[in-house]
Amino acid sequence: MSTAYEPVIGLEIHVQLATRTKMFCGCELSFGDPPNTHTCPVCLGLPGTLPVLNARAVQFGLLIGLALGSQIAERSLFHRKNYFYPDLPKGYQISQYDVPLCSGGGLGDVRIHRVHLEEDAAKLVHVGESGRIHGSDRSVVDFNRGGTPLVEIVTEPDLTSPEQAREWLTLLRATLKRLGVSDVNMEEGSLRCDANVSVRPVGSEQLGTKTELKNMNSFRYLERGVRAEIDRQIGLLQSGEPVVQETLHFDPASERLTPLRSKEEAHDYRYFPEPDLVPLVITGEMRGLAEAELPELPAARAERFERELGLSAERARELAFRTELGDYYERALAGDGHDPVAVANWIPLLVERIGSDADLAQSKVTPEALATLAGMVIAKEVARDAAREVLTQLVAEGGDPRAIVEQRGLGSISAEDGGLAEIIERAIASDPDAAEQVRQGNMRAVGPLVGFVMKETKGRADGGEITRLIRERVGSES
Amino acid sequence: MSELIDLSAAEAAKLTRAGELDRAELFDAYRARAAADELNAFTWVAEAAPDGDGVNGSPLGGVPLAVKDLFCTEGVPSQAGSRILEGYRPPYTATVVAQLAAAGAPLLGKTNQDEFAMGSSNENSAYGPVLNPWDRTRVPGGSSGGSAAAVAAGLAPWAIGTDTGGSIRQPAALCGIVGLKPTYGACSRFGMIAFASSLDQAGPLTRDVTDAALLLRHMIGHDARDSTSLPFPGEIAEPAAEDLRGIRLGVPDELAGDGVEAGVLESFRATLALAERLGATVEPCTLPHAPHALSAYYLIAPAEASANLARYDGVRYGLRVDAPDLISMYTRTRSAGFGPEVKRRIMLGTYALSSGYYDAYYGTAQKVRTMISEDFRAAFERFDFIVTPTSPWTAFELGAKTADPLAMYLNDFCTVPMPLAGIPAISIPSGLSDGLPVGFQLAGPAFSESRLLDAAFALEQAIGFDGSAARR
């Protein structure tokens, strides 16, 4: 009987801030522009140049800290992190070290360790087959990215599964997106996630040796990479081998984890306070401005959806954690008299139709149309099955649901409609055994009868209504 | 011609402003002298005054300026005395150089210096040592040795340099001119090739105190591109004090006794006597932690330098020695590009910042630095200025200390405490010892430059030092 292990996971997230200019100079940020067109003496690290801190980046850092409930340091410091690499023009990165802007806090059920400001490195392009620096024909540097403002968010090791890690990162991404501080695009690298992973015997209080997984550039890769690493570590321990502390690169194609650098090459970063910058002092005014700019965050929005609109916790999170879904939902509710739960239930159906990666705001289904359709179902103007058909047409062509119902003759057939009573008679005649069982109280037997009616009415009758009418007709005992 | 050269910069500026002296004639006269430099003071000399210069009424009157090589000057070699920046021409100009040019002091040339300002004799320059105009077998001091020698020899009317541990004041003393290190933050460091960021300050090297005040007036000010620069409270006035009545001078035992050469001490004491005759009170004071200043300095400055010099990696500019792989390229480039003193300090600084040693070295040095600041703060409660010899000795012979780095470091014994405290200090010539100039140093509280210049002016008038011998 082998020991059962549990994973312990912490995340380090780098967020490129969507400021207009770089962290320490006036160059505009850029994506996809020709290489080395957004550079100046400062971000190229030319002799004699000095950094000047971007006030907007500080403001964004404050917003993130406030959103995460962190303690904001009234006075924080920048340090130099020293190492040689061609993507680092000064030979050091300016980063916060022992006195970061934000400490503590939490998001959802994960505690935040710290949030600090720093600058991004430039981009190295390795020309040749390997795609990495070793074995490349030559390497060239694009300094456009160099000096882009970054915020690093470090969690406590509070995550216990790859799925939870992925879900939590989704919440963080939604929160950052809602704050408007970043494009949070993992594929483009404006949101980058490293994971610290260890495993320990279930019940143990002691943390196992951790490894660091670098730069998993999608939610799926994060989940798969962490899972692969957990499996690898458990495999090692079960065969009596130790886990070695190292940094690993996850290759999503092969699902293999390869060491990035060995311990022999471990850096001594020789951190010391950056003498070219003065301490970052956060005044009450700066804090007040950030607080005023703070929007409603996804977690609070989910709580409000649940409390005020009566949504289930799961549905509320589903809508609130994707800002665009929440926004669409609230636009749909803007008209009078809509049932919030009914409208909310239609949104996942719409997402399913257009695909979860598609942009809801770009779909042909306007929020008003979806709300109208939901309302028509409630008012029994259109049966549920027919309504799904209306949605299909809305997704394809857009338009007004009422017009579609009218035009295609999809309106409900109600009890008052003589035709429906006649169809129910035929249904009972077609299956007298089922009718008898319904009469005796076996409600499962009603299915085939309802199915007969639905088929005959092409889905225009309401299933519940049909069941009620059949039971009435046969004189059900229960 | 010799009459022109004997004018102080302020006098020449006054004449050009009055239309009594032609700016181009003045520029050409100095250009010719700088081009015929036999002291190796210049590493580059302008072909002609830049266009657009000579705007009538400019406060500095078109009087040409010699600029230490480590100031970046657009399109003009800025090599910081190093092989690793040989031929490097920056795409922009340092703030103080731009300010001075705008005020009417055009660039005459770039002056030789110790590599990356690391040295006290100018023998650490990749472009050869500078000779002292008072005795060409001797050093001019450093690291702003080229600027000091150029001004002393009349190859330039005035110059700017940088001071990290004494690099303006010590060469000024050894060359018999005036050198001022301003309050940290008074002058922008933008465009100054960095040695030790928390200590480096630009300042004037001039023939007299009036010139220093005039030049400094146009160097100061907050620069949005330097976060550590500060708005200067008030203006730098033209010094005019005729006496030192009411001025209290403190003489720290720690910096004005043991280890100071007899001739220097004699000149120092004579100057103190003169100060008393001008109405000053002179009393001993104590800076208990000053003897540790040199040790703290030689941890903090190399630590900062080890990071500041990391950018010279052969990737983007300057020297590159090609190699089959990245690490070898770094190693070969930096081995070939840096001189021995620079390598020594990079290693010192790297060690001081290393994991496990940081607290013991860099951390302790920072604590000592704080104590030194406290010593000065306490002293300035009782005294207006602290006075010391600028250098423990006069100009020494070329090669005399090159084999012994620690002996070389002692050059800065009296000048290092002030930059650690961020306070201003000025060196003025107090006389000759065996035919070589001696420097007298006054240090004041932060932003006391105007008062400091006034006191230095009163003393200067009383001393009546004649530096013309060096201009022959």
Image: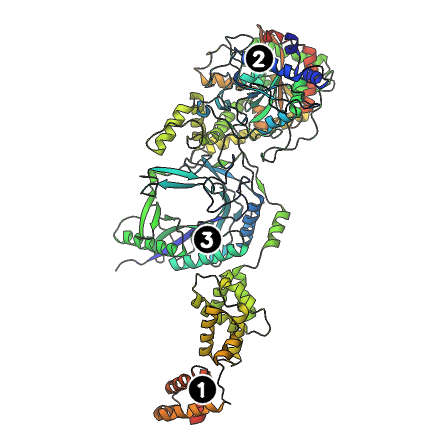
Furthest residue to the front? A407
Q: Position of residue A117 (x, y in %)?
A: 51, 44
Say whether residue B463 is visible.
yes
Label 2 secondary element? helix
Report crowding for label 2: few under 14, some 14 to 19, many 20 or more residues within 10 A (C-alpha): some
Say which quadrant the N terminus of chain B sits in: top right
Distance, label 3 to label 1, CA atoms, is: 49 Å
Label 1 secondary element? helix
In the image, B113 versus A3, the foreground residue is: B113
> Up-down: is A269 above or below B450?
below
Report crowding for label 3: few under 14, some 14 to 19, many 20 or more residues within 10 A (C-alpha): some
The amino acid beneath tag 2 is Ala
The chain carrying label 1 is A
Marks 2 and 3: which is nearer the front? 2
Which residue is disc 3 drawn over?
Answer: A185
Marks 2 and 1: which is nearer the front? 2
Q: Where is residue A110 in the image (x, y as percent from the top left)?
A: 46, 56
Which residue is disc 1 drawn over?
Answer: A466
The amino acid beneath tag 3 is Asn
Q: In which quarter of the image is residue A168?
A: bottom left
The amino acid beneath tag 1 is Ile
